[in-house]
Amino acid sequence: MNIFDDLLLNILVLTVPIVLTHIFWLEKPGSLDSYDKYRQVFLLFICSLAAIFCVTHPFFKPIGNHFDLHIIPVLIAFLYGGIRSGLAVSGLILAYVYMMNGPNFVWIVTLLALLVPFILAFIALSNWKHLTPKVMFPTLLAFISALATFCITLLYRVGSFVPVDRTFLVYGILYCLVHLFTMWLLTYLIARIRENITLRQEIQRSEKLNVLSELAASVAHEIRNPMTVARGFMQILSQSQVTEEKKHVYTAMVIEEIDRAQGIITDYLSFAKPEAEKLEPLNLSDLSSKLNNLILPYAAARGVDIQIDMKSPLVIQANEEKIMQCLLNLTKNGIEAMTNGGALQIIGFKKGSNVILQITDTGVGMTAEQINRLGTPFYSTKNKSTGLSMMVSYRIIRTFGGLIEVTSEPNQGTCFTISLPAV
């Protein structure tokens, strides 16, 4: 039973640190096929500790010999850390054995002197990293190394006239099989970890490319519409039979469409780079009067009554230009949602460590599906809108560490609740 416990402990000590090393290091940006300086040093450290533990705690102890798993960390260092890491681990094993057990030192030197050239030749000739599956070849290498160690041990015992009994042969066979299983387990876990990380990175790249292509196509489509209209009016203006009155009308339409295209580009740039250049403490109570002056004419033209109730002070860390752009977008959307007039309420108060701003309209409202799609690229509930303004508003609030929540019911109005960290 002690042999079984020692064996499981050796496998655990070998498996857990090496697998965790691959998980943590491979999650970081960098190539999956090559370790940088720090990764090599860390893997060297882990393999050295594992090898020293295996040498100190052998699981088979027949008379005159100790069978342990120190070959496994040496192979891991060679295969995944490079030749220098493997040689360094081998050197550390020799130094440790020399300090702890002098007579066994010559035996370890002999084994490593025979195995290391074989391992290097295997790595140089097999090109195993480019073969599939990547588990079979390291496993075969571990089995052959263990078999060679057992054969050398057997020859040594025969040459020294030490009896070779049945127990020794059974231990030798189990020793080779344990190396086979342990190396298969380690390389299988490492290969799966690397494959999963590679797959996840490919999925992330594909998602980014899909979003980029959709965004580029949407921007091109939205800009093409006003450009097509402007081009048509310019063609009409080039005709000599167009009256002066129509020329003025068409010119105004061309300017309007060009301004629309410019607005789309501005919204896109705001979404692509929303970071505020200058953050400063702002009192939303003071900004409410400026906001009221900006939206009041637009609201009056649509028969909307503006009601503002801001508790003072409501200080946040933000950029005035960006936060005003966000508030204008949200209030304008609320006004446009009330096609037959109504009331737009803007309420501000402090709740705990946050400043809460609520913008409520009595418009057409939205369904749950529409609410979930708010802030996604080029989605809008209005026919002649790109949806960029709402996307920009969400991005601005997130930039300042805030959150936007929406509650709405069809034909019952909509409430946008903005939560920002208070200063």
Image: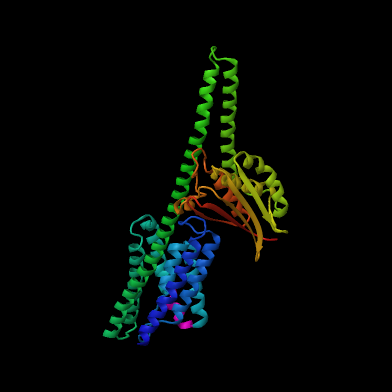
- The residue located at (62%, 52%) in the rendering is 345
What x and y, as percent, mark residue 139? 34, 66
Residue 281 appears in the rendering = no
Q: Position of residue 382 (x, y in %)?
A: 50, 42
120 part of magenta stretch: no
- Where residue 116 appears, x then y in whole percent? 42, 67
For the record, the magenta segment spans: 101-109
Q: Could you tell me if residue 214 is visible in this image?
A: yes
Magenta stretch, main secondary structure class: helix
**Which residue shows up at 60% across the image and 16% down it?**
244
In the rendered image, residue 378, in percent from the top left (x then y), is placed at 50, 43
Q: Nearer the viewer, residue 289 or 237?
A: 289
Side of 222 where 314 appears, left or right: right
How was this image coloured?
Answer: rainbow
Front-most of residues 381 and 337: 337
Q: Residue at x 55, y 16 (%)?
A: 238
Q: Kindly identify the residue that appears in the image at 49 percent across and 70 percent down.
A: 89
